[in-house]
Image (spheres, rainbow, N blue to C red):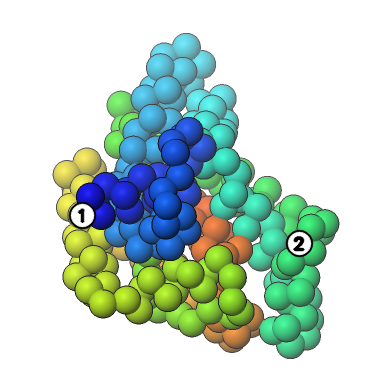
């Protein structure tokens, strides 16, 4: 069944879950992007459940480290690698081609290291500020929002060059994609509202707003999006949505 094949491909792409790869591989994963928010909610729920258990014993910063560390482990650090590459590219002063070249370099520079460090520390700090009873719901909402951001990015921008990112952009131009995109957005917003009401909704909206900024910046600085930009956006959107949840918890 096509839907289940695309779900399996998307789950294999986003996580280290040992499933047999689908015959379509990356193509099926790209076409199955609409599953990303629900897979994200699943990842966040796993990390959140563990975090709530840990918070019973050692609350605070240690809980944040465990939660974010577990999410990074489940996702295989692939998105974090993209964040590092983007950080290196942003340090280059020159045309888009030079920035992209720096992003392809296997060596991690200061820019990539610092950007990744700041985003991860922000995410950990936010989780450590969450009440224990909200850990699972918050992490599920934020991870769903992070995955939705990648789906939106594929729909908004052209690829900078042929590569992994181009496969997702191409899928977002396929017949029937507007319907799939609508389902993906609606399911993410509905899930976030069900989990956290207004705080969840604001978390998703903050990730969507960040996506617009990243899409525009990628167009201007890189000439389009790359696989690294998708991964970097995932990490930044998680941090943005968690920050929104923490702030909303103080204000609302």
The residue shown at (45%, 45%) is 21
Q: Is residue 32 above or below residue 225?
A: above
Q: Nearer the viewer, residue 76 or 252?
A: 76
Is residue 40 rendered to the left or right of residue 106? left
Q: In the image, residue 111 lies at what x, y percent?
A: 76, 61
Give coordinates of residue 245: x percent, y percent: 36, 47
Mark number displayed over residue 111: 2
* Residue 248 visible somewhere in the drawing: no
Neighbours of disc 2 within 10 Å: few (<14), some (14-19), many (20+) = some
Cα gap from disc 1 to disc 2, whole angstroms: 35 Å
Q: Residue at x 45, y 80 (%)?
A: 157
Expressed as whole percent of the image width and height from the top left, the position of residue 228 reads 60, 63
Q: Earlier in the sequence, mark 1 or mark 2?
A: 2
Figure quadrant of residue 204: bottom left
Residue 24 occupies which quadrant of the picture? bottom left
Dot label at residue 187: 1
Going 54% across and 27% down the picture, which residue do you hit? 66
Q: Which quarter of the picture shows residue 104?
A: bottom right
Within 10 Å of disc 1 (Cα), the crowding (few <14, some 14-19, many 20+) is some
Q: Is residue 54 above or below residue 74?
A: above
> Which one is closest to the eye, mark 1 or mark 2?
1
Compared across the picture, whether 106 is left or right of 73 comes to right
Residue 15 visible in image:
yes
Instruction: Provide the secondary structure element on which disc 2 rests.
Output: helix
Q: Residue at x 26, y 77 (%)?
A: 175
């Amino acid at each position: 069944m096509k839907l289940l094949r695309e779900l399996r491909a998307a789950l294999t792409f986003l996580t280290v879950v040992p499933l047999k790869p689908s015959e379509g591989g990356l193509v099926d994963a790209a076409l199955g992007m609409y599953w990303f928010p629900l897979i994200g909610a699943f990842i966040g729920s796993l990390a959140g459940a563990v975090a709530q258990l840990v918070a019973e014993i050692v609350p605070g910063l240690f809980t944040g480290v465990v939660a974010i560390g577990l999410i990074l482990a489940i996702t295989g650090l692939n998105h974090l690698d993209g964040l590092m590459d983007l950080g290196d590219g942003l340090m280059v002063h020159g045309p888009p081609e030079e920035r992209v070249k720096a992003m392809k370099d296997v060596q991690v520079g200061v820019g990539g290291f610092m950007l990744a460090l700041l985003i991860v520390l922000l995410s950990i700090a936010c989780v450590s500020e969450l009440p224990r009873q909200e850990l699972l719901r918050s992490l599920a909402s934020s991870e769903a929002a992070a995955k939705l951001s990648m789906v939106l990015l594929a729909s908004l921008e052209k690829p900078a060059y042929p590569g992994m990112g181009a496969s997702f952009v191409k899928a977002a131009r396929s017949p029937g994609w507007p319907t799939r995109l609508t389902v993906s957005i609606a399911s993410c917003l509905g899930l976030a509202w069900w989990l956290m009401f207004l705080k969840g909704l604001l978390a998703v909206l903050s990730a969507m707003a960040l996506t617009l900024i990243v899409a525009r910046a990628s167009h201007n600085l890189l000439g389009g999006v790359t696989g690294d930009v998708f991964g970097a956006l995932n990490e930044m959107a998680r941090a943005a949505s968690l920050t929104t949840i923490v702030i909303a918890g103080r204000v609302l």
